[in-house]
Amino acid sequence: MNKRVFTTLVMVCLLANTVVSQENLKLMFYNVLNYPLQEPASRIQDLGVIIDDYRPDLFMICELNNEEGADNILNIIQSINSDYQRAVFQLNTSDDNLGDQNDLQNMLFYDVSKFILEDQIIVKSIYRDFNHYILKLRTTNQDTNPVYLDVFICHLKSSSGTVNQQLRLEMINDFENYLETLPSNNNVILAGDFNLYTASEPAFQELIDTTNNITFIDPADKVGSWSNNTNYLEVFTQSTRTANGLGGATGGFDDRFDFILTSENLLTNSDLYYVTDSYQVYGNNNNPNCYNQEINSVDCDGAEFNQTIRDALYTMSDHLPVTIELHTTESLSTNDVVYNNGIKIVGSNVVSEQLQLNIAQSAINNITIYNTLGQKVETYATNHATNVTIDVSRLASGMYYITSSNKHIEPLKFVIQ
């Protein structure tokens, strides 16, 4: 960009009181290891060190135990970036004879100055849910030329052996069946702990099958037999530890279990695309001496990730995060992005028949109620009223969330007794 163009853009931004940019968007996926039930409780401070250093625009996680953990993580991120919010917490629904998996959930955290969360959908599988988050970039022309990103977060069945390989394949088959319902040109990210040992596993081969409606690629371009193969040490993500006591796996640094895959079109798109060579395992210095060692040992030292970062990663989880960047050629606008409490519950949030709301913003057109599974239950028109009374007598007892047509209004919890 030449000096004249740059100066002009700065002047326009100042006059309009609007920040406009074309920029890279930073994505991070992290297996947070049974958070918050796994001790020590101080792990959240280690996560803060990691987030503060990388500053992701989208933060995707698995192994979240409960909503308290989601709130803890949101609080630590908001202390770094106040524009951050999270999706609605959803318990796993894919329980069957394989066992109750409600101790391990996925979650998305996102920067509302750059993304709008349009919807979230549970995709059931034989073992654990895939969580689908439909995001729209907050661009200056989002109404006339919207740019969408479909983000999926997953956690495939763990452990080696043909039985577990087959279970991973069945999970991916369920996922692929859902993808058949989407337009083939959608921008799609699949992030998760895949628990794969080699690219020859049927589950991975299904993901990269070019006959699929949506074909995934490994943006790291490191397709091979990963486990215990130092040729792929650069993409190893587990284990950060050799000693017991902090939970999770031990055994040292020797596996690639965590991935961010992109749909093929994210390599060729003009408005949103993968930034070449941006795939990175955060905390991995690609030091050959790190093989089978602890991530915070001197054997894993390097110029990019210092001792402080690697100490935080060691304590936080037995996995390392994976990061990529996407670039948009559209202009992002952060004008008037304020996340606030525009809706208030009048009186107690424990009700039986009627829920009374005070709405501070006339721009709110409707109120939507979700249950704890993230399923939409009811939508009510507000007619731009300041005080609204909602009949909830038909709803079953339990906890619910209120959201609105204004994506910057913080979701509220209420209980029907």
Image (cartoon, rainbow, N blue to C red):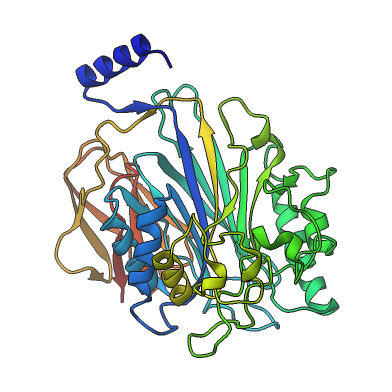
The residue positioned 29% from the left and 28% from the top of the image is: 19
Farthest residue, direction left = 347
**Residue 260 placement (x, y as % from top left):** 62, 53
Q: Is residue 375 above or below residue 64?
A: above
Q: Is residue 77 above or below residue 36?
A: above
Foreground: 313 or 401? 313
The residue depicted at 28 percent of the width and 19 percent of the height is 10
Which of these two is toward me, 93 or 162?
A: 162
Most foreground residue, 87 or 325: 325
Residue 408 drawn at (x, y percent): 30, 45
Q: Is 362 rendered above or below residue 340?
A: above
Side of 4 relative to 117 (left or right)? left
Q: How many marks?
A: 0
**Residue 328, horizontal then vertical, whole percent:** 51, 30
The image quarter in which residue 288 lies: bottom right
Residue 231 seen anywhere in this rendered image of the structure: yes
Q: Is residue 383 left or right of residue 331?
A: left
Q: Work out whether residue 356 or residue 162 is closer to the camera in this orientation and state it.
A: 162
Is residue 319 visible in the rendered image? The answer is no
